[in-house]
Image (cartoon, grey):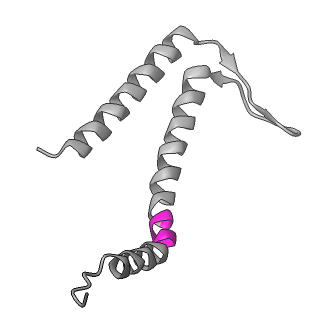
């Protein structure tokens, strides 16, 4: 059994349950303001759900980009390690 997909699912389930509980307890409408812009009034739970969804999608899109950026650094580091751990049998 692979543990990583299970832990990922567990974290998502905990977040969904937390958002559901908070949205039920905070049903009052709120409006968001940014500089001069103002949104319509929507329930706080809906704001939290959209924020969590945008965060999950954003991280899913950015994670491969971080992997590509560190790929070149990882290769050079592995080459340095390979040079460091060479057996010298010519004493």
- Locate residue 54, reporting x and y percent: 54, 44
Outermost bottom residue: 90
Q: Is residue 68 magenta?
A: yes
Judge left or right: residue 32 versus residue 37: left
Q: Looking at the magenta stretch, what is its main secondary structure?
A: helix
In this view, 74 is above or below 13: below
**Looking at the rendering, which quadrant does residue 21 occupy?**
top left
Judge left or right: residue 23 versus residue 6: right
Q: Is residue 67 magenta?
A: yes
**Looking at the rendering, which quadrant does residue 79 occupy?**
bottom left
| Foreground of the two, 22 or 74 | 74
Judge left or right: residue 90 versus residue 82: left
In this view, 9 is above or below 23: below
**Looking at the rendering, which quadrant does residue 8 occupy?**
top left
- Locate residue 83, reporting x and y percent: 36, 82
Name the residue rendered at 36%, 34% in the picture. 12
| Quadrant where the image shows the N terminus | top left
Name the residue rendered at 33%, 79% in the picture. 82
- Locate residue 15, reporting x and y percent: 42, 28
Outermost front residue: 91
- Locate residue 87, reporting x and y percent: 24, 81
| Foreground of the two, 52 or 1 | 1
Outermost right residue: 36
* Magenta-drawn segment: 65-70
């Amino acid at each position: 059994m692979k543990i990583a997909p299970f832990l990922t699912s567990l974290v998502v389930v905990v977040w969904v349950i937390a958002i559901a509980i908070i949205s039920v307890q905070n049903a009052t409408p709120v409006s968001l303001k940014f500089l001069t812009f103002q949104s319509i009034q929507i329930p706080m739970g809906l704001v939290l759900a959209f924020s969590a969804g945008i965060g999950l999608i954003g991280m899913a899109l950015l994670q491969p980009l971080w992997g590509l950026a560190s790929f070149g650094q990882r290769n050079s580091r592995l080459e340095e390690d390979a040079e460091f751990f060479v057996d010298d049998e010519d004493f």
